Image: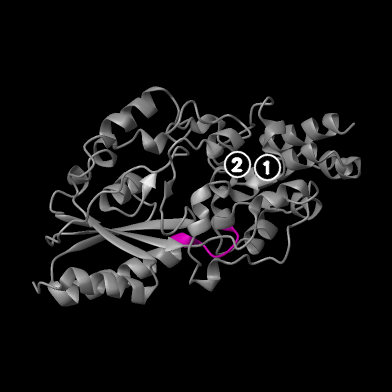
Amino acid sequence: MRPDLKERLVAEATAVGFSACRITRPDAIPQAAGRLATFVAGGRHGQMGWMAERMEWRGDPTALWPEGRSVIMLAEVYEPGHDPLAALRKRDRGVISVYAQGADYHDLVKKRLKRLGRWLIAEAGGDIKVFVDTAPVMEKPLAQAAGLGWQGKHTNLLSRDLGNWFFLGAIFTTLEIDPDTAETEHCGSCTACLDICPTDAFPAPFQLDARRCISYLTIEHKGPVDEDLRPLLGNRIYGCDDCLAVCPWNKFAAKAREVRYRAREAGLPKLADLAVLDDAGFRARYAGSPIKRIGRDRFVRNVLYAIGNSGDVKLRPVAQALADDADLAVADAARWVAARLG
């Protein structure tokens, strides 16, 4: 193996489109298994049963692939280019998390990972496995161990160079590559991300209860959302960016290089237009988007909650038309809206 492999690897990662590249070892996160076990034992994973499955792999990358010797962690910036919080004032419009407004990052990041992996094999041999949110891999602890950034009080990864608007990808390799120094926490006394959370989803700094997180409720949670939480969703219909948007480190946020992460729709979508989507209409509108994974029913359920929070009585007939929807959660949401705006 050439001694300058790591330097050339970082250069190639930049060339294929990544914003940063750092190296760690599979055994660099010994604390992860215990933290995951505590999170799951407390029920804070909600309906995300997959987090409780294969915990031995998720908590220990050496168990996931014993042959792996190095983990290449990559960051890819997607930043909003505007203030995401301003959209929350437009109550008749639906707010979609910045990361989901453009093309599906799973597809774009994985293609780059594979391209970089092929380059690595051609240059130095070895075997690889690539991951981007699709396997029992704890990307954020690995990224901190690699020096990409640190997990802030909102539990997301943030960086002094990139802010916190970026995706993570990982390449596991059988090659021995010198690891980088782990990053330390630089949140200080700031609690902006904790203070802004509409649902108080952070029991303490650096801890998240997913069952109260709007991103979880609008994306992962199946069935009706607790009525106490519905008013707190506002007009957020897919995900939530509040804790990311207020982070002071975003003043150093890098610019996205990938134009396909930009919003595909001009302006914010009207709730009235989204509520009437049937399954075919939903799939056509959100083909190639991360939004497609939650399906029409959960999406329209979210839209109805936003209508109920709009205070706009002119939208009441839109909800009434869905009171007998085939999906029970949609029908329940429609009846809730009709009563709320009645």
Q: Position of residue 225 (x, y in %)?
A: 63, 31
Q: Is residue 219 above or below residue 118?
A: above
Q: Secondary structure at mark 2?
A: helix
Mark 2 and mark 1 in contact? Answer it, CB < 8 Å. Answer: yes
| Mark number, residue 218 | 2
Residue 306, quarter of the rendered image: top right
Residue 103 lies within the magenta run: yes
Query: Which residue extends farthest top?
Result: 42
- Image quadrant holding the C terminus, namely top right
Q: Is residue 312 above or below residue 19?
A: above
Q: Secondary structure at mark 1?
A: helix
Q: Position of residue 260 (x, y in %)?
A: 54, 70
Crowding around mark 1 (Cα neighbors within 10 Å: few <14, some 14 to 19, many 20+) is many
Alpha carbons under labels 2 and 1: distance apart:
6 Å
Residue 269, quarter of the rendered image: bottom right
Residue 300 lies within the magenta run: no
Residue toward you, 31 or 334: 31
Query: Which residue extends farthest front?
Result: 189
Residue 240 appears anywhere in the view: no
Which residue sits at x=31%, y=69%? 114
Span colored in magenta: 100-106
Which residue sits at x=9%, y=74%? 2
Check disc 1 and give the amino acid type. Answer: Asn
Q: Position of residue 150 (x, y in %)?
A: 36, 46
- Image quadrant holding the N terminus, namely bottom left
- Sequence order check, earlier mark of 2 and 1: 2
* Residue under pointer 1: 302
